[in-house]
Image (tube, rainbow, N blue to C red):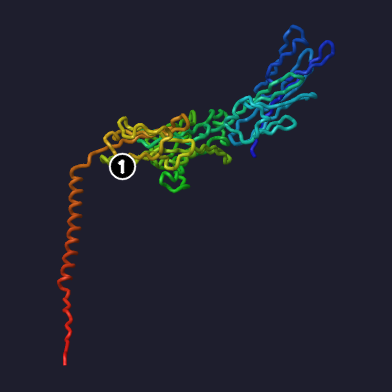
Amino acid sequence: MNYVSGFLSIVIALFISSTGAEDVVYGQVGGTVTLPKLKWGSEKVTVQWYFGMDQKSLIFRNAQGRETIVSVQPVSPLLAGKNLNLNCDVKEIFEGTQRRWLSPQKQDLNKDKRAQIGNNGGLTVMNVTGQDNGEWTCVVTYQGREAYANTPVTVIDLSPAHTQPIYTSVSSLSLLHLPCFFSIPLPLSWSGSQEKSIQGGRWTFTPSPAAGSLTGAVQTLVNLSPGPPLAWVANQKRGLDVSALQRKNLNLSLSKKGVTEGDRGDYTCAVEFQRDDTLKREMRVEVLQVFTSPGPVAFLGQEVNLTCTLGQPLTSDLEVKWIPPHHSSLLPLDSSPHPTLLTIPEATYGNGGRWRCELWRNKTKLTSVEITLKIERVPMDVWLLVTICAAAVIFVLLLILTVILIRRHRQRVMMPRRGKRRFCNCQE
């Protein structure tokens, strides 16, 4: 396990009033503490602790209080997937003092399954992500009063992963965008660090079986050259646009204009750092396609099938909606969900035109695809060919029938006749 540790120092101010009573106030180093007015009269007393760039120990002193000496250790940036270890360091813990942690989203870490809180107030967060980037808070409670100690935590991560596939459609005008970028700018301290700088990366593609390729055949689309400057090296000519890569913002996204069914599959963006550390983002691309059978041109009266598909059966949360031409004989269509296979029993001129298939999830349209269907009258040369073929078939059948009759007639003629038997009646 890899841990990145950090400490929060809590300073304790122990004040003694003129009556000899003691009061305890917790505060974060570098922060501001206001002493209770009831104890100090109407005068507002503010004490500040400052921590310089030299990271030396600091001293708090009040003319009517005691001295405390504390130290601060900053939290260094870490990559997503590492474990974070924070310690809320309180000097001279008094009985009844309690500590708890809040995430950057101000959620109590006692309810986070990834978090482990020790008896000494230390916090360990397993497998941090970009959502853990931000300000973490240690809350110290004593006698009903709370003190908040904050520390910034920088988590280097890629853009949030897609919880659902990316849907697009087959079209020469469709744009496929594959996002991959750092969720926050890299710290300036990393720019010259050989241990934490980017060492390379790649985009890989695993075609879906629906794309007509063997599953598991991983293809490397582009490689990331560390440079300087960073640059993509394309391995395949697939019309990929890598111009989004800029050294300033490290945008590693890819795009592609003109989508085909061969673009279905799983894409992975990987960025490699020193010590075999790698950040990855995986995304699945589903491509909607529509086609007609027997083809985009049909004849009057012919049966036509239109199919709208992702190359595989739709999941239960998806449905298609057909938008036929205004004069289609299938209007009105039944209420959704519509079938993925739409059949026109007898094509008419009204069925010709632009058919659109839309893919929906609940009330959200994901993508759509169009196809133009042409309905034509059967050409004269086709009728002539059909007539000739029919006549030829009839002629051949008649010829065969004639030959059969002639052969049977000949067999009857050639068959010898048997004479009648005669009997002799002899008398003596």
Q: Residue at x 72, y 9 (%)?
A: 44
Q: How many labels does the image show?
A: 1
Q: Which residue is drawn at 33% across and 43% down?
A: 293
- Under circle 1, the secondary element is loop
Direction from residue 99 to residue 352 in the image, left or right: left
Name the foreground residue: 305 vs 330.
330
Direction from residue 382 to residue 225 in the image, left or right: right
Report x, y in % for residue 409: 16, 67
The crowding category of the residue bearing disc 1, from other C-alpha atoms within 10 Å (few below 14, some 14 to 19, many at least 20), is: some
Q: Residue at x 18, y 84 (%)?
A: 423
Direction from residue 68 to residue 347 in the image, left or right: left
Residue 4 in view of the camera: no
Name the foreground residue: 49 vs 193.
49
Report x, y in % for residue 378: 22, 42
Residue furthest out toward the front: 428
Report x, y in % for residue 39: 78, 11
Residue 178 in view of the camera: yes
Q: In the rendered image, which residue does mark 1 sit on? A: 303
Image quarter (top left, top right, bottom left or bottom right) of the N terminus? top right
Q: Is residue 215 above or below residue 8?
A: below
Q: Residue at x 35, y 40 (%)?
A: 343
Residue furthest out toward the bottom: 428
Residue furthest out toward the top: 42
Q: In this view, does 420 lie above or below 314?
A: below
Image quarter (top left, top right, bottom left or bottom right) of the C terminus? bottom left
The amino acid beneath tag 1 is: Glu
Q: Which corner quadrant of the image does residue 373 belong to? A: top left
Name the foreground residue: 309 vs 418.
418
Report x, y in % for residue 321: 40, 33
Residue furthest out toward the right: 20
